[in-house]
Image (cartoon, helix red, strand yellow):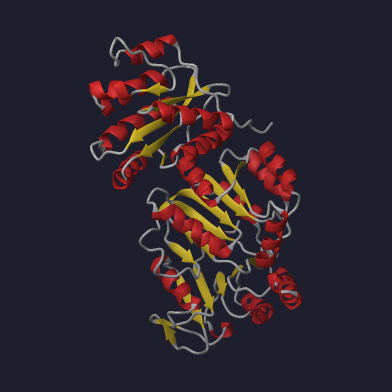
Amino acid sequence: MLDYFFNPKSVAIIGASSNINKGGYSIIKNITAGFRGKIYPVNKSYKEILGIPCYPDIASIPDNFDLAIYFIPSKELPETVKECAKKGVKGIIIESGGFNEAGEEGARLQKLALENAAKAGIRLWGPNCMGFIDGNRTYVFSFINSLVWPDVLRGGNVGMIVQSGMLSAGFLLHALQEGVMGVSKVCSIGNKCDIDESDILEYMINDRETDVIACYLESIVDGRRFLNLAKQTDKPVIVLMGGRSAEGAKAAQSHTASLSGNYKIASGAFKQAGIIEVFDPAELTDMARAFGKHMTFYPHPGKGTAILTFSGGAGTVTTDLMEDCGLPLAKLSPETLASVAELFPPWNKPDHPLDLWIAIERHGFETVFRNSLTAVINDPAVDSIIFHSYATPLIGQAFFDELAALIRKHKKPAVLWVEGRKDFAQHLRGIAENAGLPAYREMNRCVTVLKGMKQHYTKKPMT
């Protein structure tokens, strides 16, 4: 089931190059960084590339091979498919453009290549795409610049399906540069002449290394299949849909030949299938990495969110944002409030949201947040928590490890908002994320992420 794409034993790079300014060089440089199978560069201009023998054409390759990466002009594709068939190829990733998105002649070439592939039993991925990256194996089957990814790529449990080629690189770098999310597979699928989002979705659903699936799509080839797959899986499926507006749909058509359907219908269907819809790239990666850290939490519907803050104003604004998103504030029990009140002076009693600053001045941040969280997380009215923290380098990893362990024990998802000096905030966010607690610099991101998490964890199973 698409294993010949994700786990090939041998790969031919058609259009490999030794010119460091060309994508054909980046492809072979990237593949040699992590892939340990046989590699066959194909380019009549070279005898070898990066010390690997280079072949003038596919027929000259002495062995059969599983996968081909195509990076030469579109006019050569139909004949290349025929040549690949003679070598037992099962899949071709077409990373060059010039097909359906380029007008009549491009559409003709794509149709002919598809016909030739169907006769030979070959699956086509793309065209007009950036291929895929496997973070756990360091497979980079893409022309992404070889200087860009080595310092940031890390394995993880988040899979991404991205229709736009260059945006897939943008998503990846946005997610990874912050040092807080690892990926299982990032798949750029381009024009989707054969392999489409449902094929990749089904593969990721069955992939043991993928727990969360995040998608940027401009169209869906088989809506019924996609929705049914999303409905049947326990894995979170998050979708950012491009082309929601009439002008956005025209823009999508111009660069990937996508024909979007009625967005309002699609959005309603997403909700019925339990798909979490997001509205910008940052929200997509925010949601994905939050789920990547919280995979075993099951809030009960109808409960509320607790807010633990160092600022009454911040608690008020968060409450407003929660109401905008339809998230109720938890009604804390008298016992919970009495337990927290032990940290306060007699003349001041806590209310909810819990403004803890007076208690922090008396007992310190860690003592107050530890004891308050213990009280709140045991309250049956609480199904999730938003923390607010001011940025300080004095809070250590051990403290956040302790908080995260308590959160995991009670299976109540929590997110952290960090405010204050930038370098301190980055430090605090890093140790929180390392402990497994998603942390953000923007308050509204905490709320929207928590809304998506609650939506998924209250998803009704298929009957």
Residue shown at the point (70%, 63%) measured from the top left: 253
Residue shown at the point (43%, 9%) measured from the top left: 334
Which one is nearer the viewer's eye here, 68 or 273?
Answer: 273
From what the image shows, is residue 332 above or below residue 413? above
From what the image shows, is residue 252 above or below residue 276? below
Horizontal and vertical percent for residue 111?
Answer: 74, 72
Question: Which corner quadrant of the image does residue 138 belong to?
Answer: bottom left
Which one is nearer the viewer's eye here, 368 or 120?
Answer: 368
Residue shown at the point (72%, 68%) measured from the top left: 118
Where the N terminus falls, by quadrant? bottom right
Horizontal and vertical percent for residue 307?
Answer: 43, 26
Where the C terminus falls, by quadrant? top right
| Residue 409 in view here | no
Horizontal and vertical percent for residue 339?
Answer: 35, 13
| Residue 281 in view here | yes
Q: Please state the total of marks drawn on the protein image.
A: 0
Horizontal and vertical percent for residue 458?
Answer: 58, 29
From what the image shows, is residue 329 above or below residue 269? above
